[in-house]
Amino acid sequence: MTDAWTDRKRRSIMNLCVNSRLGTVFLSSKECSMEAHTSQFIFEYVKHVIQQVGEGNVVQIVTDNALNNMGVAKLLREKMPLIFWTCCATHSINLMLESIAGLPRFSRVLQQAKALTIFIYAHHKTLAMMRSFTKKRDIVRPGVTRFASAFLTLQSLAGKKVELKAMFTSNEWDECKFAKTVKGKQAYSTVLSHAFWQGVALWLKVFASLVKVLRIVDQDKKPSMGFVYGELMQAKEEIKNALNGVEKNYEPIIRIIEEKIQNRLDTPLHLMAYLLNPYYHYKDPRLHLDHFISMGCVEFLETYYFGDLEMQNKILMDELSKYKKKEGMFGKLIAAKGYESSDGQYDLDWLVNDEVVVGDEVEDGDEELDEEALRPRRSSRLRELEEDNFESESEEEVDVDVDIEFEDDENHVIDQYGQGDGEDNLES
């Protein structure tokens, strides 16, 4: 089920799609601009449509994390115990990333980077100078969400560190009248600051592992349910390592991750998919001994085979036992090769918005571009929702013809991080 959203005419519509035993099916659309979007209202709508197709034919309802939808989940578990309710993994992880980016040590770096890029793009002279030093490669990298834009722009800045330092220590900069302004001096200070670049490196190193998870769940090529929980657990360990195992540094980040996972991405459905993914289970045969995972799998069977104790027992005692011991088909060579590698490597097309608006070049005055000028002008696939809101933000489409050359991602822009501290000697 997707939320109601408000378009320019304030016309609100609710769509219902369910994961049935025959696949994902679109069931109905409802005009609801005049209705109060309460949990009860949404639940009654969902219940009515599900009853039309038969409760036994519906496996899963997926929503985002808005509070009214969380209320629907509670009602669904009480009234329709045969059906799984699941939060949208993409939305959950995006909220996770936004929350971590809001921590002081990360938001400070991001604000410095924003101020730097806004200053450069605000004046045609500074913009032309930057493009000259970077060989026409821009530093603004618009993404499909605010976080994606921030990640890509910081990544782009890190890749052009040498060129930017050369620009701000050049004769051209000394002769530029904007070098004498307050914001010009701030930009100079930022680019020449070792602490800033150290912060950028740490920012990217910490977030890279979570962006990998977002990349896995926000694509349509292969099913991702079996990787969500496992990759999040791996991301937690990578973040701890990135911060040199110092608890006071990683604890606020891990706390946010765990808060966003709880009751959203660690449901019985996620845990059973995790256990049944040989990529994880055969790497760690003790995985099935984890009490939390075991209880999740039992709850999954109690829901999926509701009331059928014989089938629940058969799977727990017979089928899962064969899987754990690699008996029968699970012991074949082809099965072993399959679980030796993850199918979690995907390209980055989903992350990058294919439009960029940098604003018209202004005259030599001291005008500044509004920060909105650096943001994508296109409705994103990942809706920017706060957890206590129901409606998504709408973005006006703006047609702007801008001739900009962007560097090729070459599918390596994430994988390069986490390979060691490098010259920045990340703090412990």
Image (spheres, grey):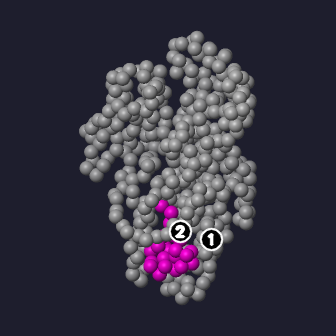
Q: Position of residue 184 (x, y in %)?
A: 52, 78
What crowding class fits label 1: few (fewer than 14 Cα within 10 Å), some (14-19), or many (20 or more)? some
Residue closest to the eye, 43 or 152 = 152
Q: Does the magenta stretch include residue 140?
A: yes
Q: Does residue 56 appear in the picture of this structure? A: yes
What quarter of the picture does the C terminus occupy?
bottom right
Type of the residue with mark 2: Ile
Q: Where is residue 118 in the image (x, y as percent from the top left)?
A: 48, 70
Type of the residue with mark 1: Lys
Task: Report which residue position mark 2 lands on.
Answer: 139
Of callouts 2 and 1, which one flags the residue occurring earlier in the amino acid sequence? 2
Question: Which contiguous range is marked in magenta?
Answer: 115-142
Q: Where is residue 248 in the image (x, y as percent from the top left)?
A: 69, 50
Count of labels shown? Answer: 2
Determine whether label 2 and label 1 are within 8 Å by CB: no
| Residue 161 - label | 1
Residue 370 located left or right of residue 161: left
Q: Does the magenta stretch include residue 208?
A: no
Residue closest to the eye, 165 or 348 = 348
SS category of the residue bearing label 2: loop
Residue at screen point 57% across, 78% down: 133
Residue at screen point 74% across, 30% down: 285
